Image (spheres, helix red, strand yellow):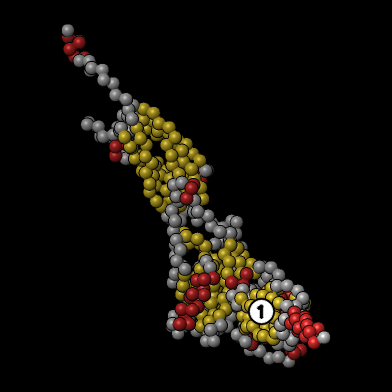
Amino acid sequence: MKNIVALCVIVSFMVSCSTAVKKRVVDAKYDFGKGIITINIENMTSCEYELKVKDFIIDKGNITAEKELNLLNLLKANVDISKDLSLLAAQSNNELEVILKCANTLDTVFNYRLPYVFVEQDDDIRFSGAGAKLISKSASRNVDEELKRWLYRKHIVVDDTLYFTLRNNFKFLTEREENDFVTEAEIPILHDIAGVKYNVSSSIQADYYAVVACQNQEYIDEFVENAVVGDYKNLSTSKSSLSCVTQKIESGYLCVFLIGINKDYSCQQVPIAIVAIDNTAPSREYSVQKHAPDHMLFKGGTRIIIPENAPQLFGVGSVKVVHWDGNGLECNVTFSIDFYGDCKCVTIQRRGELCYRQYVGGYLFKQEDKVFHAKDYGTTHRFSWKMHFDDGDNEIPIIVEDYHGNNSNYNVIVRAEFVRSNTSLIDIENNIFN
């Protein structure tokens, strides 16, 4: 009997151990760069969660497996509280405290930084300096009345700087398309824009100002960082007589920005104009032909659209010898010329040995240049020209020029081999008198 009792106790203990409840685990990892929270659960079939910014719930639901929460998408989805979220961010250097609660298991806080975004082009913005004026596609959207009425009803008073950030945040969270900028003016073509003076009238308010011309956001970020580290030495406290600082490129399009930097490190940027830089001569082959992109992309979904009728900055001036024949002393050479892009003209030079210096009477052919303009011949032109060829490689000098004063030189090489007769020369004088 004692043995039976002992066996029951042992069995009971084993059953108790095998049915012990495992600890429920909720794990949340945060990718600050992407603004994504990833939640995983263990030893539980589901878990209720709630995501809040201060007292505002931006998401809630039930987790049954791994779940990703994209904070920016969630903020944009809450249209009804977009003004509140925009103001909270503006009041906290554009940082929001996001609180995640998962049942009674997890309660933690993540900091999300709302991207600084940029005011659309003001209808009355004016500037002097180089560039075709940029206009936002959404410039017709008037959010000021909506925001100011909301602030009044909430009895909230903000200064101009805070309102500017609030306004930008609100537009960013409520825009459903890219923030596209376009121009209807003719884009000027320059060789350089560094040092060009700008006077700008804009609603942007900041402690320091600068004008920057660039192709990407990285250049602006680096410029702002260097300006802050350098104690704002080369910046201006007004929007007048600003010397343009430019990203160095050989050829391409640059967007001109008005940059406003505050002492609290906050930064605003407004695209005001677009310019073209061209220091590239036409190439000789299509294989190395370059093409300008159709837009430039900056932070906050800001796209600078390059119009289809924008001036071409790259071209081709290709010259080839497609056929030749002759006896060496005088050869008939057929050329094919291809024009593309901003190639203005091609010059073929007949000089030196190509003209054949005679012992008496100078050159057999006149030394001269033939200039062919794309506007006269379209994309392709063929013509023949007499030249002297020697055995071996014969070099024909070519000059190509574009519409913006850039030119380059290259040589077309034609290899010639002439068959010489080994027949004895006839002594005409002796034959006559014998």
Quarter of the rendering containing residue 134 = bottom right
> Which structural element holds mark 1?
strand
Nearer to me, 233 or 405 = 233
Nearer to me, 327 or 185 = 327
Amino acid type for the residue under numbered disc 1: Ala
Q: Residue at x 80, y 87 (%)?
A: 2
Q: Is residue 267 left or right of residue 96?
A: left
Q: Residue at x 30, y 32 (%)?
A: 391
Residue 177 x %, y % = 69, 68
Q: Please identify the residue farthest to the top as the structure is shown.
A: 434
The residue where tag 1 is placed is: 28
Q: Does 400 appear above or below 178? A: above
Residue 227 x %, y % = 47, 80
Q: Residue at x 77, y 77 (%)?
A: 46
Q: Is residue 299 visible?
A: yes
Nearer to me, 285 or 277 = 285
